[in-house]
Amino acid sequence: MKKQRILYVSQEITPYLPESEMSIIGRFLPQGIQERGREIRTFMPKYGSINERRNQLHEVIRLSGMNLIIKDADHPLIIKVASIQTARMQVYFIDNEDFFERKAVLADSNGLEFEDNDERAIFFARGVLETVRKLRWAPNLVHCHGWFTSVIPLYLKRAFKEDPLFTDTKVIYSVYGDTFKNSLNSDFNNKIIMEGISKEDLNVIKIPDFIQLNKMAIDHSDGIIIASREANKELVDYVKVSGKPFLDFLGQEDYIQAYSDFYDQILAS
C-alpha cells in the first residue's frame, strides 16, 4: 500500500525561529507523523532573521528560477532547503529578495507590521504550491499552520483544483492565537485573484484583517484544528458552527496521535 503523503505548510518552525506554540508544533508534528509511517514534506518562509550559515541552508537550483506575478510585478522564486538531522527531516524554504531579505519576520523592530505582508503571504502560498508541482509530489493532505498560510486552502480548492496533483487533496487548517493588529492592504482581494477564483470566493473578506483571513481559510478547508488555547473566540465559534469536522485543543502530550487519527477521518471523508 502506498504511503500517505502529508504536506506541512508552517508560518513558524523551530529551531529556525524562536520557540513558540506554533513553531514547536511545526517542528515535532511532521517528525511524529513521519514516524507513524507517512511520507512528509515541510515548507516555511525564509525570513531574513534565519541564519543560513548556522542552519546550513542551501539553494535548490533545480526548483528555483520561476517568476511569480503579483499585481503585474515579477518576483523571482528561490527555494532553499535544510535538514533537521535528529528528525531525519528536510525543511524547504520559500525565499525572495523583495519579501524576505529584511531581518525580521512579520513586523519591524518597533512592532510595526510590514505593509506588504499581504503580498508576502500570497507569494509564499503560490511558491509552496508551484514548488510541490515541480517536485511532482502529490499530497493526500495539506496541513496549514498560521494566518500566513491562510491563502493556501483557497488556492487548492479553486485555482489549483484542476491540477491532477491536487485534485483529490484534502486540506486541514490550524487556528492559532497568532493575531496581527492592522488590516492588510485594502487591495488584497484583487491581488489574490487567479484563474479559477471568483469574487464570490472572497465574500468573507470585506476588510482583510486577521479574523476574515482565518474565516476564508476555514471556509475552504476540509477540517479544522483548534491548535491553541489562545485561539480567537470568534474563530473558535465560527469553526464550531461551520459544519466541518474539527479537533478541539489538545495539550502537547496528546496531540500528535490525535492529529494522525484526525487525518484518517478527513482522508476517509
Image (tube, rainbow, N blue to C red):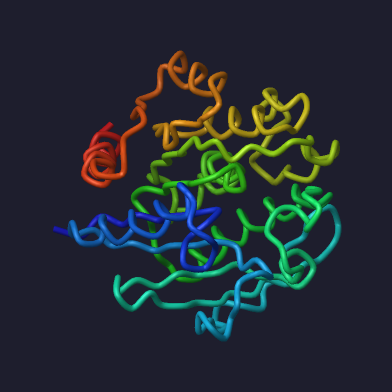
Q: Residue at x 40, y 73 (%)?
A: 90
Find residue 217 and report its horizontal and vertical position in percent. Answer: 56, 35
Up the image or down, 32 lies above or below 208; here it is below
Find residue 77 and report its horizontal and vertical position in percent. Answer: 67, 71
Asked whether, in this view, residue 138 is left or right of residue 73, the answer is left
Up the image or down, 231 lies above or below 60; here it is above
Find residue 20 and report its horizontal and vertical position in percent. Answer: 49, 51
Q: Residue at x 65, y 66 (%)?
A: 47
Asked whether, in this view, residue 168 is left or right of residue 4, the answer is right
Q: Quadrant of residue 35?
A: bottom left
Up the image or down, 12 lies above or below 242; here it is below
The residue lying toward the viewer, choosing from 251 and 263, is: 251
Q: Residue at x 70, y 46 (%)?
A: 194
- Quarter of the image where the C terminus is located: top left
Asked whether, in this view, residue 4 is left or right of residue 43, the answer is left
Find residue 28 and report its horizontal and vertical position in percent. Answer: 34, 58
- The residue sitting at the front extreme is 110
Q: Residue at x 31, y 44 (%)?
A: 252
The residue lying toward the viewer, choosing from 233 and 196, is: 233
Q: Quadrant of residue 108?
A: bottom right
How many labels, in total?
0
The residue lying toward the viewer, choosing from 76 and 247, is: 247
- Quarter of the image where the N terminus is located: bottom left
- The residue sitting at the top extreme is 241
Up the image or down, 178 lies above or below 137; here it is above
